[in-house]
Image (cartoon, coloured by chain):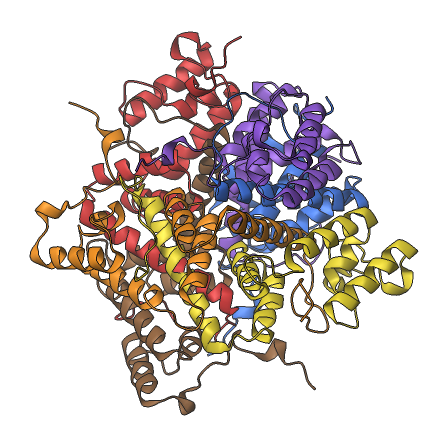
Chain colours: A brown, B red, C yellow, D orange, E purple, F blue
Amino acid sequence: MTDDRGAKSASVKVVEEKDATRKVTNIYEEIKTTLGIDFVHNMYKALAVNPDYLELTWRKVQAVMGNDGKLGKNTKDIVALTVSIMSGCDYCIGVYNDAVKRAGLNDEALLELYGVIDLYTGLNRLNIGLQTRTDEKPWHGCGGGR
Amino acid sequence: MTDDRGAKSASVKVVEEKDATRKVTNIYEEIKTTLGIDFVHNMYKALAVNPDYLELTWRKVQAVMGNDGKLGKNTKDIVALTVSIMSGCDYCIGVYNDAVKRAGLNDEALLELYGVIDLYTGLNRLNIGLQTRTDEKPWHGCGGGR
Amino acid sequence: MTDDRGAKSASVKVVEEKDATRKVTNIYEEIKTTLGIDFVHNMYKALAVNPDYLELTWRKVQAVMGNDGKLGKNTKDIVALTVSIMSGCDYCIGVYNDAVKRAGLNDEALLELYGVIDLYTGLNRLNIGLQTRTDEKPWHGCGGGR
Amino acid sequence: MTDDRGAKSASVKVVEEKDATRKVTNIYEEIKTTLGIDFVHNMYKALAVNPDYLELTWRKVQAVMGNDGKLGKNTKDIVALTVSIMSGCDYCIGVYNDAVKRAGLNDEALLELYGVIDLYTGLNRLNIGLQTRTDEKPWHGCGGGR
Amino acid sequence: MTDDRGAKSASVKVVEEKDATRKVTNIYEEIKTTLGIDFVHNMYKALAVNPDYLELTWRKVQAVMGNDGKLGKNTKDIVALTVSIMSGCDYCIGVYNDAVKRAGLNDEALLELYGVIDLYTGLNRLNIGLQTRTDEKPWHGCGGGR
Amino acid sequence: MTDDRGAKSASVKVVEEKDATRKVTNIYEEIKTTLGIDFVHNMYKALAVNPDYLELTWRKVQAVMGNDGKLGKNTKDIVALTVSIMSGCDYCIGVYNDAVKRAGLNDEALLELYGVIDLYTGLNRLNIGLQTRTDEKPWHGCGGGR
């Protein structure tokens, strides 16, 4: 009896493209076309165990990320990376570090982003420790100059 | 002996403007001028217990947030809000919800931002649960269309 | 001088079964018998550096998890997996992904669990961002239909 | 100029039932009917600023929570509470503490649930500190007795 | 039917001293004597719903915190406060901010502690974002000078 | 086109010592001298992409950690490790597990530290779940005996 724990793509048995039902195949094709890639990544192959959940997730992702909206795609990608770093999801950090670079952020800009995250995780925790009370008057962020 | 736990601005005794030493007063004035406010907020008044730490923090905040850099001030403020929400720092969320609104995000844009955060905290945790392995080939984020 | 950082079972030197004192050996035997395994896993071998802490932990684990109680063992295992995913403890996620499968959850049920976690981490963060105030009247969860 | 920060239901201006568009009104009615309540809670009234996002969220909630599925509604509610506690979302904890009680968990069962959460957040962090390596052989949770 | 959500000490009905069974009364007395207080705090009164869990928790607390051990009680209290700040548990932060002050940390020392927490939450998140690989050779912390 | 994702030291291209500008070289030398090591670790080599951010970070680290202050270097290192464990930063946990050992904590003391972290992450989450209200009177930590 072999122990194949190291070899798996995910904690559930993923649905490979050749084994997919028609419904799943259709979504797989839509994913590949939309994202401009020639394979389906592990996350969606895992979700395909439950085709309805796969569809629900893919539709929500497209509704939220598949258009510029008011923030713009670049800013949304930066927020997606920030959230992934805060969640400590290594898989997602890898994907979004790549994504924001491809979208035009060079290493210096990436480091600037990490710098904002570094600063605010520190300040957040400082204020949580201090149990700082809301100020009597509103103010508008640390940067100033507007 | 009274119990004044509810009345305090923070867990340490804050330094009010009228009680500040010259060094602290100078930083207080710089904060007010730079941020365009007529008071010093509770966080900095708490840090003033240790003037060197107050100065170090204020200088770092200015170096990171006080210029457009490569990301631009608006994007930095959006990242600051995102980080604060992920840290669960109620004080900071309040300040930055106000800050991004003042910088031009209306309620609809703010909700769009929350939507990205909602989506990715969900996807992050899903991949952490799935223990998704890195894909064989790189891809570039969920949004596509570039 | 060799660097064996990669080879260790844990950050402390674990107590192997052959090196254990009588007290530790007795607990090791109890662990193996109770859990139906023929080895002691790395966590308990690390705790054995402090036999009292090993005992305290093992007793608490048994008191909390070693009986059905009111929730039932299956539900407790599902909660244990949920907590491990939320904590981002990769070691524990691996153990409990296996545990709930062995207890009868197939891949589809596991994906359903991840779906609830995905949904609520998203909604939680959304409400933290929104700083939603408590509703005037109580209500009873998002699912309805009871 | 008044400062109404304390009086708001959320960080965005919520859409009251009387001010809702037809689309939003229809979803509001569906929410009230499905959940058996005579009001719309603050979270959905805030999402209604963006009717598409409101609809997307409500549909996902119903798809995940509105049926027994394989886990059963009670277990899903317990997981929803567990996730909310791990996220530290006070609003959601309040709602789901109420929800699981109404679904039949008395105070003793609730305390048993907190006990599992207490145990595993502790063990998780212990293993994260220990940097425990994956065991050579699989095992199946701390409870044993199966 | 009144809604008393705001008035409760906790999410479960706490066991007041006058209503306690003999077993619970004995533990309550031990808590008061050991901690040198003339009342039982809300956490233990909530745990008393399940007397075995109350006892288990109190015994573990005493085993871990009720002696100097190798780290010393002051350092343990500082760690307890640090953990509480990282968990974002407002109740516990309040208790331990008071505890370390009473144990001798003045406001300046407390701010120094927050400074270390501020620094490392920032550096931690920076390295999580950078996905920094383990260095080829070991080194020993950022402070140096040993 | 090769995929070198596995081979990188960090998500940005690190600045090796031989490629450093004079400013960066000077800081690198100061780091090596201060920490008593003959190489620069990956974190600082990544920050060097932005020399000002490298300098800012190194100066803050020295200001906070490079002196005994009121808490003492050993206690600061213990807090740094605790924070890193709570953040789940594997890189930082490795460095600080080594650091506190080198500073004199043996495996038993390290396990005692993990025990405090285990206990309080559990109690924190328990109180977050219980939504425990602040007690009417102050008390001073769980350890007692002072």
> Residue B141 versus residue C64: which sits nearer the camera?
C64
Q: Is residue B84 visible?
A: yes
Q: Pinpoint residue C105: horizontal percent, then vertical percent.
A: 52, 74
Q: Is residue B119 above or below residue A57?
A: above
User: Residue at (45%, 66%) from the top-left corner?
Assistant: C114
How many callouts does the rendering have? 0
User: Residue at (30%, 39%) from the top-left corner?
Assistant: C133
> Residue F2 versus residue D26: which sits nearer the camera?
D26
Q: Is residue C54 above or below residue F74?
A: below
Q: Is residue D5 above or below residue D92?
A: above
Give the side of residue C104 with respect to residue C39, left or right.
left
Q: Quadrant of the C terminus of chain B?
A: bottom left
> Residue E85 versus residue F3: which sits nearer the camera?
E85
User: Residue at (30%, 81%) from the top-left corner?
Assistant: A27
Give the side of residue B87 with respect to residue C89, left or right.
left
Residue A5's quadrant in the figure?
bottom right
Q: Is residue B136 visible?
A: no
Q: Pinpoint residue D2: horizontal percent, then vertical percent.
A: 17, 23
User: Residue at (34%, 82%) from the top-left corner?
Assistant: A28
Q: Is residue C49 above or below residue B92?
A: below
Q: Pinpoint residue E105: horizontal percent, then vertical percent.
A: 63, 21
Q: Pinpoint residue D48: horizontal percent, then vertical percent.
A: 18, 52
